[in-house]
């Protein structure tokens, strides 16, 4: 659980649109300072400063492989939340599809029961009220 | 009612009258007929409903393909309006699928009349406490803005290059 200072660091890091743009890019894949700078109208040293802020907020980590230093999004808690939402969305989707079919069946059965009950040629056709 | 923004919102229209759709949620036999993905089932003798404000809905979910699983769902109903609204806290315990911890989640289901005798369901669900602690909630909110931020950044870059 992040402490209050940590939380402040996260919020102030996210408050800046350039840093959010950087995080959005890192959500796709890891990237170097050069790659992160390319779509932005600011200098590489400026991007480096933003990366330091994000790193202090533990929103990213930086790895060195060879001479290139890549930044990586660290959003494990966020991912867990997103996974949960996705799981429940799928759950509702499949449940509600079944509900759709169920309601159609219930209504069809109700109409059949009505027809049967109204049919004078069917003796004792009054089916117990199923409260459909 | 919870004024916090729900993390999950689903709207769907059914070709059935509102009363019938409501009953599909509140009649044990009917809920058992459709709840959950295909392959799960709700043993009838383990379903207990007392649908009213302050009441409950309880059932067990079993899965044909995974007999070791037994999920107990206990819903504390905080708000009920006959034919219109079900709101409560759902607790999931028992032998849950791998990777899923017992959890509780607030939900709200509204039943609205639509034209031609159809019904619109509005389902809202809130993340479990554990996942929506202030930090993560802040993150979640911040990250929903990321796409917009990215689009803006691309627009700025395009202007810059142009």
Image (cartoon, coloured by chain):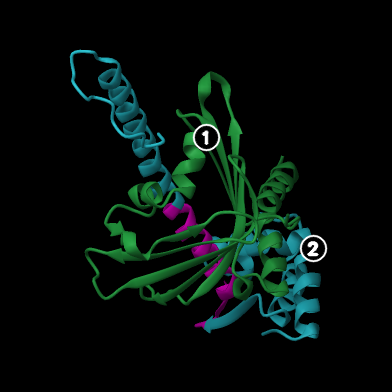
Chain colours: A cyan, B green
Q: Quadrant of residue B140?
A: bottom right
The residue where tag 2 is placed is: A16
Identify the residue at horizontal 77%, vertical 58% (top origin). A17
Q: Label 2: few (<14), some or many (≥20) within 10 Å?
A: few
Q: Front-most of A81 and B33?
A: B33
Question: Which mark, residue B34?
Answer: none
Q: Which mark is on residue B19?
A: 1
Residue A16 locus on image (x, y percent) = 79, 63
**Residue B137 in the image, given as x and y percentages of width and height:** 69, 67
* Residue B125, position as x, y percentages in the image: 59, 56
Furthest-front residue in view?
A124
| Left/right of residue B65 with respect to residue B125 in the rendered view | left
Is residue B137 magenta-colored?
Answer: no
Q: What stretch is highlighted in magenta?
A: A65-91
Dot in front, 2 or 1: 1
* Chain letter belonging to callout 2: A
For residue B58, above or below residue B13:
below
Q: What element carries label 2?
A: loop
Identify the residue at horizontal 22%, vertical 63% (top origin).
B64
Most foreground residue, B161 or A81? A81
């Amino acid at each position: 659980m992040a402490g209050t200072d940590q939380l402040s660091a996260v919020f102030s890091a996210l408050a800046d649109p350039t840093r959010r743009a950087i995080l959005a890019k890192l959500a796709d894949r890891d990237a170097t300072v050069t790659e992160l700078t390319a779509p932005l109208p600011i200098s590489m040293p400026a991007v480096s400063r933003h990366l330091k802020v994000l790193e202090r907020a533990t929103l990213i980590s930086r790895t060195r492989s060879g001479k290139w230093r890549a930044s990586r999004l660290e959003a494990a808690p966020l991912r867990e939340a997103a996974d949960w939402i996705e799981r429940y969305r799928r759950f509702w989707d499949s449940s509600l599809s079944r509900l759709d079919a169920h309601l159609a069946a219930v209504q069809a059965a109700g109409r059949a029961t009505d027809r049967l009950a109204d049919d004078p040629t069917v003796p004792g056709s009054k089916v117990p009220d199923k409260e459909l | 009612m919870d004024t916090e923004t729900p993390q999950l919102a689903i709207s769907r229209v059914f070709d059935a009258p509102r009363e019938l759709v409501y009953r599909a949620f509140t009649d044990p036999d009917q809920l058992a007929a459709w709840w959950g993905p295909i392959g799960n089932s709700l043993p009838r003798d383990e379903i207990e409903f007392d649908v009213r404000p302050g009441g409950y809905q309880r059932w067990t979910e079993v899965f044909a393909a995974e007999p070791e699983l037994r999920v107990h769902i206990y819903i504390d109903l905080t708000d009920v309006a006959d034919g219109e609204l079900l709101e409560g806290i759902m607790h999931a315990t028992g032998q849950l699928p791998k990777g899923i911890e017992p959890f509780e989640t607030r939900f709200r289901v509204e039943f609205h009349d639509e034209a031609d005798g159809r019904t619109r369901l509005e389902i809202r669900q809130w993340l479990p406490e554990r996942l929506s602690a202030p930090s993560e909630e802040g993150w979640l909110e911040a990250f929903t803005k990321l796409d917009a931020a990215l689009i803006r950044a691309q627009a700025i870059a395009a202007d810059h290059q142009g």
